[in-house]
Image (spheres, rainbow, N blue to C red):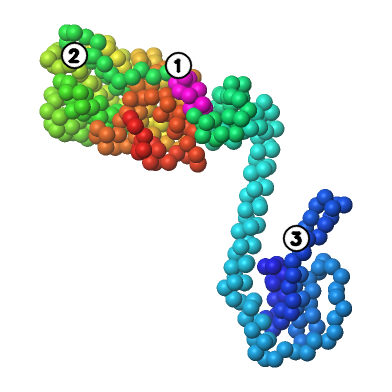
Amino acid sequence: MVEALNKVKAELGHDAVIMHTRNYTRRRWLGLRSQEVVEVTAGNGVKAYRPRGAGPAPVSRPVARPPVDAAAAARTLLQTPAASGAFMMGIQSEVATLKSAVMDLVRETRAAKTPTVPEELFEHYLQLIRNQVEQELAGDLVRDLRLTLRPEHLKNEDFVRERLAERIEKLLPTTGPIVRTKTVGPHVVALIGPTGVGKTTTIAKLAATLKLREGRRVGLITIDTYRIAAVDQLKKYADILGSPLRVVSSPEDLAAAIQSMNDCEFVLIDTAGRSPSDTLKLNELRGFLAAAKTDEVHLVLSSTASQECMERAIERFSQVRVDKIIFTKLDEAVHIGVVFNVIRKVNKALSYITTGQDVPDHIEVGRGRRIAQLIIARGEGTDAAVIAGRGEAR
């Protein structure tokens, strides 16, 4: 109708008079295909207008010009909200058709590249790929589902997502929370990692969790003397928690500081950010950790970094020492699948994740099911409410 009205305007002008409209279906290809046709009969004076391709013209007789009032009403018809609405509906319909065609093309292209992915699970496969789960890993996951699920279950979207989450969870090694393993002296934990990943804030969250929620005696040490702001930040947290804080600049001072906190159950060490490419600084860090006789070392990585950067950091920091991994800034990450890829590839267990700036609320023990649910969440990227854990028991 929109196209027909536009032709009327174009060929007869705004003085055109709509005399008759009808819709009908035209059969094509021996009746196997059909085409919806809109026919508008319009005129300017006694000459009626029929759009091209509208079929045989009916026998016409001269038509007297309608009265002025009727002509004005007919002209107004083309400019009414209804006509505008029809025009917008036409545009929306065309956009929807175009979008559908593009999606079909995408599916056909990807299906051609991944012929072994079951058709009934292809949308779930695409969701994994959209979240940047590696193609081979995503393919293995859905093929495994196809072999283990009954045909009637494959049609149940929620059921399939739940089973997919279970499989991702099984592939994600986790360590659980920090646990004291000593009967004498403090359990010493060090956080290391590249610059800007949020080590100082994460130390504060861990200290607050141990002190406020578990009632533990916690001491804090920082060797990040390169950034005065980091020292001031940690001092404020220590004052709030009522925990001792020591600032050290050498391995010998670090050992002495730990000894001075012998009555603490836990000592958390904040280190300066190191570039994975700076061999000299990494060797310096190795000396600090050796002097501290750390019980566990957590590598802190930002989930907003690229997979290549994460893997590079793990490779280089593992030459110093890496026992567990903490992923920060999941609230800022666009694709959680990268976290899954990295943990699988480097075979390091996940200890904690952080989901915002609030201390101590925005830190969680790393759990495979949590990561799995974020990966298979619907939509582009991941919804902030899902990341923050609202509506889900922790």
Is 12 in front, or is 288? 12
Q: Name the residue under label 2.
A: 186
* Callout 2 touching callout 3 (CB < 8 Å): no
Residue depicted at x 36% and y 25%: 366
Tell me: residue 54, above or below residue 33: below
The spot of residue 208 in percent (x, y) is: 21, 28
The residue stretch that appears in magenta: 163-172
Is 301 placed left or right of 232 in the picture?
right
* Callout 1 touching callout 2 (CB < 8 Å): no
Distance (Cα) linking label 2 and label 3: 80 Å
Determine the image quadrant of residue 56: bottom right
Distance (Cα) linking label 1 and label 3: 59 Å
Is the residue marked by circle 2 packed among few (<14), some (14-19), or many (20+) residues within 10 Å?
many
* Callout 1 touching callout 3 (CB < 8 Å): no
Residue 36, label in figure: 3
Helix, strand or loop at label 2? It is: loop
Helix, strand or loop at label 1? It is: loop
Distance (Cα) linking label 1 and label 2: 28 Å
Which of label 1 and label 3 is nearer to you? Answer: 3
| Quarter that holds the C terminus | top left
Helix, strand or loop at label 3? It is: strand
